[in-house]
Amino acid sequence: MVETCDFHRTEAAHFQCYECGTAFCDTCVSVRDVEEFSGKKRHYFCPACNIPVQTISVGNIIEPFWHRLSGFFLYPFQPTPLLLTIALSVLGAVFTTNLFVRIFIWVVAVKYAYAVLTTTAQGGLKD
């Protein structure tokens, strides 16, 4: 079950104060950047109690994949992937005997497929 922010009921809570029991979204929590030896480090505090808050589990932040599954299958039908697929298909049909063009098409297709997998794995379902 997704826990929501106590102040914004439509936002998922990412932090919780164990002193007062309040759940916070990213906009409600107090953020402080502290200069340390390894560089700046970000700390999150309860705005009411002024103590460090704890992060809530990742399951509360990440949308389940079954909610995004339909977008995954619709990804190839967006303008950029569709145009690239059509262009590579036409190029392959026109230059069927040229080995260098076929290798070029293969390299572009593999590189684009890797980029698509990387983007969709991170939740980006838009081109």
Image (cartoon, grey):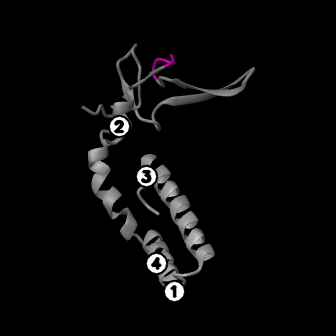
Image quadrant of residue 16? top left
Look at the picture and state if 35 lies above or below 13: above
Residue type highlighted by circle 4: Ser
Closer mark to the observer between disc 4 and disc 3: 4
Spatial distance from mark 3 to mark 1, Cα to Cα?
A: 31 Å
Query: Quick one: which residue is furthest to the left in this view?
Result: 1
The reply to whether dot 3 and dot 1 touch (C-beta < 8 Å) is: no
Q: Which residues are magenta?
A: 48-52
Q: Compare marks 2 and 1 and give the one earlier in the sequence.
A: 2
Per the rendering, the mark at residue 34 is none
Q: Say whether residue 49 is magenta.
A: yes
Q: Say whether residue 116 is magenta.
A: no
Residue type highlighted by circle 1: Val
Which residue is tagged 3?
Answer: 120
Closer mark to the observer between disc 3 and disc 2: 3
Which residue is tagged 1?
Answer: 94
Spatial distance from mark 4 to mark 3, Cα to Cα?
A: 23 Å
Spatial distance from mark 4 to mark 2, Cα to Cα?
A: 43 Å
Q: Residue at x 47, y 63 (%)?
A: 127
Pinpoint residue 57: horizontal percent, then vertical percent: 38, 26
Which residue is tagged 2?
Answer: 12
